[in-house]
Amino acid sequence: MKIAVLAVQGAFEEHEKVLQELGAETLQLRKASDLDHDFDGLILPGGESTVQGKLLRELSMMGAIRDRIKNGLPVLATCAGLILLAEKIAGEAVHHIGTLPVTVKRNAYGRQLGSFHYEGIVQGIGIFPMEFIRAPYIESIADGVKILAAVNGHIVGVQYQDQLAVAFHPELGGDQRIHKYFLERMVSKN
Ligand code: GLN
């Protein structure tokens, strides 16, 4: 099983490490021609969504990634990755990949709570250590989007068809179960 990891900016190496420990092969996506390779799933890592979005446009990767996801490529998006996937970004006119029918709010927890740790339930997985770093939350969802996790009433994890997106960093908490869920339940089933 080969999983592509968007590697233009952000915390992609940590995802690769978890995937490799779980026995998956990884492929870094740094330029448009990297998308010509065969792969079975995609990770959109945390980082800075404005920078990642700008690079995806400049590198002519946005359209191809969007099409692959629309055609059913399983994707796991974390933090900035969730912002890239969202159909709407609150207060902003642009969106990026836009395949996930939710509205996200960026830097949603204010300055005081820029970064925090929370232990909460992820549906289908159980109590999970969640690392939030200047994280977004999901303000609203369309029909068909399943809520997987919430913190203080704010949605922080969803699944919609083959797209799994969380506002926190599952690659940093030392718990591999979200990656395992992605590989076993979303990638392998295809
Ligand atoms: N604040 C970042 C953004 O708006 C996301 C932070 C993260 O990925 N940890 O893109």
Image (cartoon, rainbow, N blue to C red):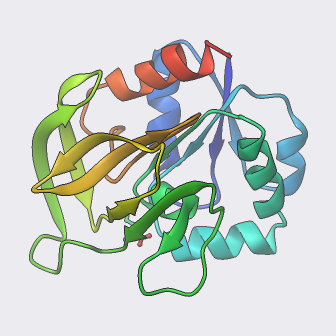
Residue 172 in the figure: left or right of residue 162? left
Q: Is residue 31 above or below residue 1?
A: below
Q: Quadrant of the C terminus?
A: top right
Please provide percent x and percent y for residue 82.
47, 56
Q: What residue is drawn where x is 59% and y is 17%? A: 24
What is the quadrant of residue 173 in the picture? top left
Please provide percent x and percent y for residue 102.
46, 60
Residue 173 in the figure: left or right of residue 15? left
Q: What residue is drawn where x is 54% and y is 12%? A: 23
Q: Quadrant of ligand 1?
A: bottom left
Q: Quadrant of the N terminus?
A: top right
Residue 179 in the figure: left or right of residue 95? left
Please provide percent x and percent y for residue 100.
55, 54
Q: What residue is drawn where x is 79% and y is 75%? A: 58
Please provide percent x and percent y for residue 83.
48, 64
Farthest front residue in view: 143
Q: Nearer the viewer, residue 125 or 31?
A: 125
Q: Nearer the viewer, residue 51 or 168?
A: 168
